[in-house]
Amino acid sequence: MTFEPPQIPAPPTPGGSDRSPSVSEADRAATGGVDVVAIRDKPRTPIARRLLLTLTGVLVVVAVIVAALAWGPGSPFVNPPPGQTPGNSASTSEEVDLTLPEQFSTFTRQTQTSPPPSPSGGDDLATATAIYTQNGEPSILLIVAGPVTDMEAFLLSLGAVDILTVNDGWCATYEDVPLCGVMQGNTAVAVSPIAGQQEETLVRLAKEAVAAR
């Protein structure tokens, strides 16, 4: 998935300005019939506005990923795996911890797209997601879901494809975007890239997020 950068205004014409005719009859007579051209500075898009447009685009893409994970084809919320009902997605008597760490490694939680519900022993699959920044820039999307007893089955239930193991974790492709994660008890902790990270890096980040929970 790629992000379309905002259009940068074209450089001004030689002389640093746009020219548009604005001539009165008196001016034309005073200059011997030669048109007098009004000089007008070209408006420029403020840098802050361009950065805001870029960040808005990132957040929109992330929102689409989250919505697809929760409600897209194959989602356990819509189409639970065979033998299960929407209220029995991965039955377990253990409590589910959907904590999203405020910070881990060099990443800081910035935008939480769904608040984590209170831990409970219910059977319904619940998720919590958040955008994490690195050096002030959106970098990864962290997804915590539970109860989950099998990471590979969980990824398959989402409709992910090309599932493989990477460094004691699992990676798959969902809507052409990598999705990698690890298990922590009955909870799946997965990471999707915003800044183009590769699979091995995503698995490492998922493990670091687990250690910080």
Image (cartoon, rainbow, N blue to C red):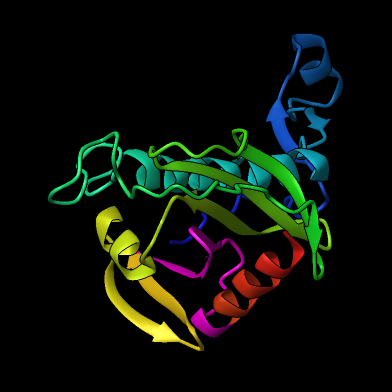
Q: Residue at x 41, y 56 (%)?
A: 148
Where residue 13 appears, x then y in whole percent?
72, 51
Question: Which quarter of the picture shows residue 49?
Answer: top right
- Asked whether residue 176 is drawn in magenta, I would say yes
Q: Residue furthest bottom?
A: 167
Question: Which quarter of the picture shows residue 201?
Answer: bottom right
Q: Quadrant of the C terminus?
A: bottom right
Q: Residue furthest front?
A: 93
Q: Residue at x 75, y 57 (%)?
A: 133
Q: Residue at x 73, y 28 (%)?
A: 35
Q: Quadrant of the N terminus?
A: bottom left
Where residue 183 appears, x then y in whole percent?
50, 68
- Please tell me which residue lies in front, 184 or 62: 184
Where residue 170 appears, x then y in whole percent?
42, 76
- Please tell me which residue lies in front, 174 or 5: 174
| Highlighted range, magenta | 174-200
Above or below, 126 relative to 3? above
